[in-house]
Image: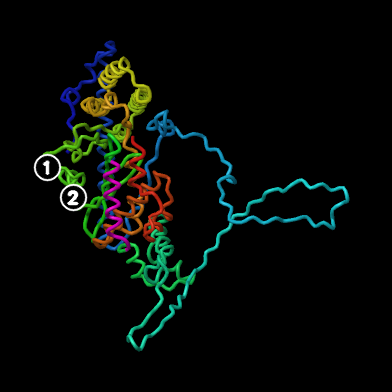
Amino acid sequence: MLPAIPKEIITLDPEGIDFDNREAVRALIIKLLNIIESQAQLIHELQNENQSLKDEINRLKGEKGKRKYSSKVHKEDKDISTPSTEKKKRWRKSAKKPRIKIDRTEYIRVDRDILPPDAEHKGYRSVVVQNIKFTTDNVEYKLERFYSPSENKLYEAELPEGIHGEFGDDLKAFVVYLYYACRVTENKIKKILEEAGIIISAGEISNILTQEKKEELTKEREEILKAGLESSSYFHIDDTGLKHEGKNHHIHVICNEKFSAFFITPKKDRETIKHILGLKKDEKTDKIVISDDARQYQEIAVYHALCWIHEIRLYKKLNPLIDYHRVQLKKFLTRVWAFYDLLDRFRKNPDEEEKGKLETEFDELFSTETGYEELDKRIALTKKKKEELLLVLRFPEIPLHNNPAELALREPVVKRKISYGTRSEDGKAAWENMMSILDTCKKQMVGFFDYIRDTFSGKHAMTRLAQLISRNHL
């Protein structure tokens, strides 16, 4: 449907324009620019839709569609979505020698025959050479046996403690590490192991990934979620699409800077979110929820904070054609980022007087009228979200953005591209459990491989993740 053109424009008589009235001429030009902008955006949308239809027709004919390229970004606009407090710092190479684990030390001595009589010993110069050995450690256990004729009984030596089946815990942990931490597919894992001398079937690799310690790992994910929610006044939440058994599902993440817990469900509505959080239908959590502006996250918490970064992205989507509008957008976003910086400073040093000033400045900022209609509409919509966007003034401990949730979802997004999705209930549970443990290990600075190996061995020598989370309250 074409956007409506004002009647005064349709009936406009150029001969009747009073060019001496600067304000009237300026208002007319602004109105015309907005019409051109809306028409240009509509043409762009129709072109994209037309191309998509052509591609679908070509696909149905067995042909290829037009290759998609990313849209160009104006050089002067490429930094408008980055807050000054989050600009990337200049990278500097750090010394790596102190971080290198030394497995053995060899002393290389100077040939005494080449030394002059007055040569004095001056110690050693250290040269570290890093290397790795990737080899099998296959063990054949010869179990001694005795038979007692009088008792008609066979006595046999027992396998050493820690042997669970024909594959060792280190090997099982390595398979899990390759699949989840390194994103290696199952068939490639099989190839890696076989070239190293391990004889293993594709089914056995699948069993290791989906069956090994399934109940224990599921319980651990539940404990991670429980500890994470109990140890903080807030949590982040987000979701993305995923295929399970060939059907559309959603993978949700609940997290903060100390933990992550993932859940795969057929729906993403409010009832689903409440079920994940263990809430009843009419119950709300007393934790502060930080999210984007998706409807399913409304009415699940007493306090709901919105992500400033997500809100500002909505302004970037305007992508105006007219230079005047682009300038207006850039100027306004510069003001928004300046206000964002003020909020960030308030978080670090809360002040009651500053709180009132920020509320007033928010009202002034988001009452701005630029003359660019689409921008003014977006500004008005942001103003309606004042309570959620300024919740940080009441609770300074909460972040201004939902970045932890978006970052946590990157791993399942990449896995989705590689593996398409999960194919069984065991596979779904494995993805939920391992991704929760993987991301929580990263946040707790715990080695994922070591932690999984410790879990598979049953020794539990390492402190459990839930305990680590509980020690570090936010």
> Looking at the image, which is closer to me, 270 or 351?
351
The answer to whether residue 284 of the structure is visible from this angle is yes
Q: Which residues are magenta?
A: 212-228
Q: Residue furthest bottom?
A: 149
The span from disc 2 to disc 1 (Cα, nearest Å) is: 16 Å
Work out whether residue 48 or residue 205 is closer to the camera in this orientation and state it. Answer: 205
Question: Residue pushed farthest right?
Answer: 117
List the single residue furthest toward the left.
282
Q: Which mark is residue 267?
A: 2
Residue, disc 1: 281
Q: Residue at image x 23%, y 25%? A: 386
Q: Amino acid at mark 1?
A: Lys
For image coordinates 33% across by 32% down, the residue present is 399
- Report whether residue 34 is seen: no
Residue 213 is one of the magenta-drawn residues: yes
Instruction: Quarter of the image for the N terminus: give it.
Output: top left
Q: Quarter-wise, where is residue 61 in the image?
A: bottom left
Per the picture, the main secondary structure of the magenta-coloured stretch is helix
The total of numbered circles placed on residues is: 2
Is tag 2's residue or tag 1's residue first in the polypeptide sequence?
A: 2
Q: Quadrant of the C terminus?
A: top left
Residue 384 lies in quadrant = top left
Q: Residue at x 52, y 64 (%)?
A: 134
Q: Quadrant of residue 381?
A: top left
In the rendered structure, the answer to whether residue 54 lies left or right of residue 275 reads right
Q: Is residue 207 left or right of residue 86?
A: left
Graded by Cα atoms within 10 Å as few (under 14), some (14 to 19) or many (20 or more), the crowding at tag 1 reads few
Residue 118 position within the rendered picture, expressed as x and y whole percent measured from the top left: 87, 47
